[in-house]
Image (spheres, rainbow, N blue to C red):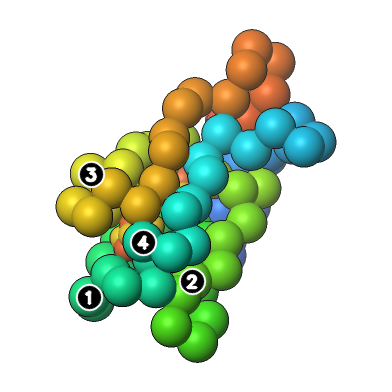
Amino acid sequence: MKKLSIEERLGTTKFIVDEGVPHIVLDKSICATCKGKPCVKACPAGLYQVQGDSVSFDFAGCLECGTCRVVCLPKGLKWEYPRGTFGVEFRYG
Ligand code: SF4
Ligand code: SF4
């Protein structure tokens, strides 16, 4: 069986964006002092990128796995599920 790349795997999901209502919000002042910035390596969708002392983040494409919520020990983010009808959809078949 062919091993799928991250991009091919993410192609099996669709994210319905709730414009102006991000379900994950970062506190950039905490991110700027966060050592190691574990969210960057932990997010399976690669949504966190190091940007100077802090990180950039785009919630569109989130898989709602909750990993960033767990690894963010400095508590630099607020995490909630998207409102109903928004967020990730998994395509099967
Ligand atoms: S782990 Fe948390 S505090 Fe650290 S950079 Fe990521 S979101 Fe910010
Ligand atoms: S919930 Fe998962 S996919 Fe979404 S941003 Fe956090 S680690 Fe990435």
Query: Dots 1 and 4: beta carbons under 8 Å?
Result: no
Residue that badge 3 annotates: 70
Q: Which badge, 1 or 2, comes first in the chain's sequence?
A: 1
Side of 1 relative to 71 (left or right)? right
Find residue 29 and report its horizontal and vertical position in percent: 43, 64
Residue that badge 1 annotates: 35
Q: Residues within 10 Å of mark 2 (few under 14, many from 20)?
A: some
Which dot marks residue 45? none
Q: Residue furthest top?
A: 84
Q: Which badge, 2 or 4, comes first in the chain's sequence?
A: 4
Query: Dots 2 and 4: beta carbons under 8 Å?
Result: no
Q: Residues within 10 Å of mark 4 (few under 14, many from 20)?
A: few
Q: Residues within 10 Å of mark 1 (few under 14, many from 20)?
A: few
Residue drawn at point x = 49 percent, y = 24 percent: 81
Residue that badge 4 annotates: 30
Q: What residue type is labelled 1?
A: Lys
Is ligand 1 closer than 8 angstroms to the Cβ of mark 4? yes
Residue that badge 2 annotates: 55
Instruction: Give the image quadrant in which the ligand numbered 1 is located.
Output: bottom left
Q: Which badge, 4 or 3, comes first in the chain's sequence?
A: 4
The vertical placement of 53 against 74, above or below, is below
